[in-house]
Image (cartoon, grey):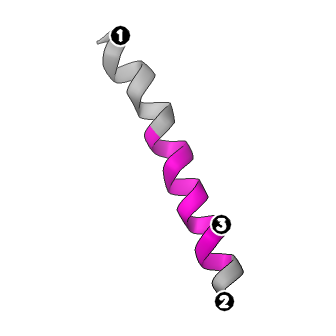
């Protein structure tokens, strides 16, 4: 469980980073 909790935030941050790049591309 502890590992999932630590991994989840990193995945979310990566997703937000991708969204930011897509928005800039537009």
Q: Which residue is drawn at 51% across and 49% down?
A: 14
Please provide percent x and percent y for residue 15. Answer: 50, 55
- Callout 1: few (<14), some (14-19), or many (20+) C-alpha neighbours within 10 Å? few
- Start and end of the magenta stretch? 11-23
Q: Quadrant of residue 8?
A: top left
**Residue on which disc 2 sits:** 26
Disc 3 packing (10 Å; few <14; some 14–19; many ≥20):
few
Disc 3 designates what residue? Answer: 20
Q: Nearer the viewer, residue 2 or 24?
A: 24
> Which residue is found at the position 44% from the left and 42% from the top?
11
- Which quadrant is home to the C terminus? bottom right
Mark 1 vs mark 2: in front? 2
Residue 23, which numbered label? none
Query: Residue 17 lies in what quarter of the image?
Result: bottom right
Dot placed on the residue nearer the N-terminal end, 1 or 2: 1
Label 3 to label 1: alpha-carbon separation: 28 Å
């Amino acid at each position: 469980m502890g590992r999932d909790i630590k991994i989840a935030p990193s995945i979310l941050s990566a997703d937000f980073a991708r969204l930011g790049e897509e928005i800039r591309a537009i």
